[in-house]
Each structure stands twice: as structure tokens, then as C-alpha cells.
Amino acid sequence: MDFELNEELTLVRDMARDFAENELAARATKHDRQSFIDKEVFAKMTELGLWGLTIPEKYGGAGMGNLALSVVLEELNRVCASTGVTLSVHNSLLGAPINKFASEAIKKEWLPRLATGEVIGAYCLTEPNAGSDAASLRTSARVDGDDFVIDGTKIWVTNGGTCGVMLVYARTDNDASKAKGISAILVPKNTKGVKVGAPEKKCGIRGSSTTEVLFDNVRVPKSNLVGELNGGFKVAMDTLDGGRIGIASQSVGIARACLEAATKYSKEREQFGTPISNFQAIQWKLADMSTRIEASRLLVMKAAWLRDKQERCTQESAQAKMFASQTANFCADEALQIHGGAGYTDHFIVERLFRDARITEIYEGATDVQRIVIARGVLA
């Protein structure tokens, strides 16, 4: 058992760290305030091959796995969670299911474009009445000749405003049980009848694009089916195993940033004639934050390692996502407390980190849902 990153992963981590510190650090607050990510950042991500990190080399990607993606996402989210989640969704929620479930024709058409960032991907599962109970979705896709005709509404679509293609989950058999009548269908955003709503005004990760997407008589070829007809729920659940590893990685990155900011401030801030880092109360906070971060990272790496081995990791990814997201929120709360009143202003980054951390316990499966998933594994 080796807990050190190999040479390849070390190089990838260092590349991501340099990019985060040299390109993102000066823009992270700007992204938060302007509610979008600078185009120059996307261009640099293309140059570094980040868009195609997990896409096979034969389709123009780097051909790396979930462990490499988790290492990169930790570094990016440590600096800018908006950029981090954009990349996570692109790789784990769109690139991954296309590579695993789509036809060769779809792979040849879309994976090279996804690998370069020419096209950014989005994932359309959640609906106004179908959140944690994803199988109750109502968006429909009826067959008409050689086409699917899609009607319905999706919400909370990450990359909705910036994407070029989206994987849409729709009901293709109304007579089947909830989960068995769903299919996954690839829909280019420029297809007639696709309407992207206004950007959501969010508490955190404000730089990332989050929108509603409406489908009104949207016609796409039946060949755009990803996976089997009426087998889309299996695609969605398998995809979320990888997506949860991505959000767990994001959580570790945010938590690290909180610890680093709190440590720095505690050494600079003086009260009662001494830096507050000399107080045991502060030291214990830092100790708890550090320990939870290390434990979270190990959970993430185990889940990513299992997925790279193509072994089932549903329980492990849920454990990583639940614990790491709780860690991010714990560390954000403690970091703000250490900063005191100053942390409650936007003069310090912990105010943004506090807001960014909150979503990690909600999207790609709320903490309560992760507990259900984990319990099922335990009881099985």
C-alpha cells in the first residue's frame, strides 16, 4: 500500500496547482462578483488539456482516470470553486457516461470536441418535482419516426449557459415503473426548441453557470440515445458515482483553503498581547480541521481508485461525498469563527469560502441521500 502519488499524478497535481495559483487566484473573487468565469480561464484550461483529462487518448483526451481528476479538482477548488465545479461536471457527468455508455458514432462525434473544450458539457436530471427522487422525473421523449421528441423542464443545470451539449434524462415509457421508463439522450444546445433560462442568483459558486433549461418539441435523432432505451436511470446512477467523487474532491479543496486562510490569520491577528495562534482554543480548531481534511482526502482517493479499477464504488463515493462535504462546511465555519467579525466581510476570502462550501452538501445528492445510499450498502 502506497499513499504517495506516482510521478504522473504528481506532475498533474503540480500543473493544476500552478494554474490555480497563477491564473485563478487573482480572478476567483472577480468570478464570484461578476457571476461568470473569464473566457481566458477556459482557454488556458484547453491549453493544459484539463477539459479532456479523463477522455481516452484515441479521442484526443489525456486518458487519465478519476484519481487524476480528483487531484486536479482539489487544487482548482482550493482557489476557485466555480471553475472547479465547471470542470467536474464536464468530465464526470458528461464525458464519462458518453465514454462508457454511448455508441462509437457518438464518441467520435463528441468526445474530441469535449476534450478540447470546443464544447462544454452539461447534465440535465433534476426537475421542479424531481430532486432527490430523480426517478419521478416528468420530462418526456416520445418516438416519432427516427427521432425522439422531447418536452419538459430541467432545473439547476450546471454549465447550462456555457455548454454546447447536454445529457438529458427523459421518460420514454410511461407504462413502466418509475426508474425503468427513463432514457438518457444527448441534446446539442443549439437544437430548435431548447431554451436556456436566466442565470440563477446563488449564495455561492456564483461564477459557475446554473440555469433552467426548457425543452419544447425538441427533435433529435434516436441515434443520440446513450445506453439502452429505458435504461437511462442506470446511466444516471452510475454517472453520479463519479460525480460524487468530483464534489468530494471539491469539498477537500475548499476545506484546505479554509485551513490555510485560518492558519495565516491566526498567526497575524494579535489579542491580549500575543498572536491568537498561541491560544489552545484556536489550536484545537486548526487540529480538528486538519484531521478531517486528511480523512476526507483518503476517502476520496479510495473511491476514485475503485472507480478507476472499474469496480463498484457506490457506497465508497457516497461516504466520500458525505464526509468531505461536511468537512468543507465544518472548516468554513471554523475559519470564519477564527477570523471573527472580519471574516463576515468580503475583505477576507473565508466569506466566499463559507458560501461556496454550503452547496457541497446539497448538489449531486444531499447529505441525507448519501446516508440512505451508505445504509443500503451496510445492510446488504
Image (cartoon, rainbow, N blue to C red):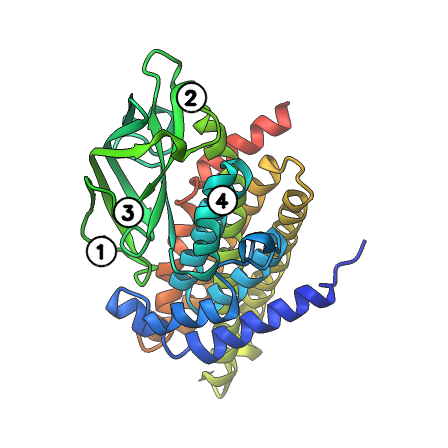
Q: Are marks 1 and 2 in contact (CB under 8 Å)?
A: no
Query: Disc 4 or 1, which lies upstream in sequence?
Result: 4
Rendered residue at 48%/71% (across/down): 47
* Rendered image quadrant of residue 124: top left
Q: Position of residue 268 (x, y in %)?
A: 48, 85
Q: Are marks 4 and 2 in contact (CB under 8 Å)?
A: no
Q: CA distance from mark 2 to mark 3?
A: 25 Å
Q: Are marks 4 and 3 in contact (CB under 8 Å)?
A: no
Rendered residue at 35%/44% (across/down): 166
Can the viewer see residue 127 in this picture?
yes
- Please state which amino acid type lies under the numbered disc 2: Ala
Q: Residues within 10 Å of mark 1 (few under 14, many from 20)?
A: few
Nearer to us of marks 2 and 3 is 3
For the residue labelled by badge 2, is the local secondary structure a helix, a strand or a loop?
Answer: helix
Residue furthest right in the image:
1
Q: Examine the rendered structure and indicate whether residue 206 appears above or below residue 95.
A: below
Which residue is label 4 attached to?
A: 107
- Please state which amino acid type lies under the numbered disc 1: Lys
Q: Is residue 380 left or right of residue 261?
A: right
Q: Position of residue 182 (x, y in %)?
A: 39, 24
Looking at this view, is 19 or 341 the one in front? 19
For the residue labelled by badge 4, is the local secondary structure a helix, a strand or a loop?
Answer: helix
Q: CA distance from mark 3 to mark 1?
A: 22 Å
Which residue is label 1 attached to?
A: 201
Nearer to us of marks 3 and 1 is 3
Query: Disc 4 or 3, which lies upstream in sequence?
Result: 4
Which residue is label 3 attached to?
A: 189
Which residue is label 2 attached to?
A: 179
Q: CA distance from mark 4 to mark 3?
A: 17 Å
Q: Position of residue 321 (x, y in %)?
A: 52, 46
Q: Examine the rendered structure and indicate whether residue 176 appears above or below residue 276.
A: above
Q: Examine the rendered structure and indicate whether residue 27 appears above or below residue 246.
A: below
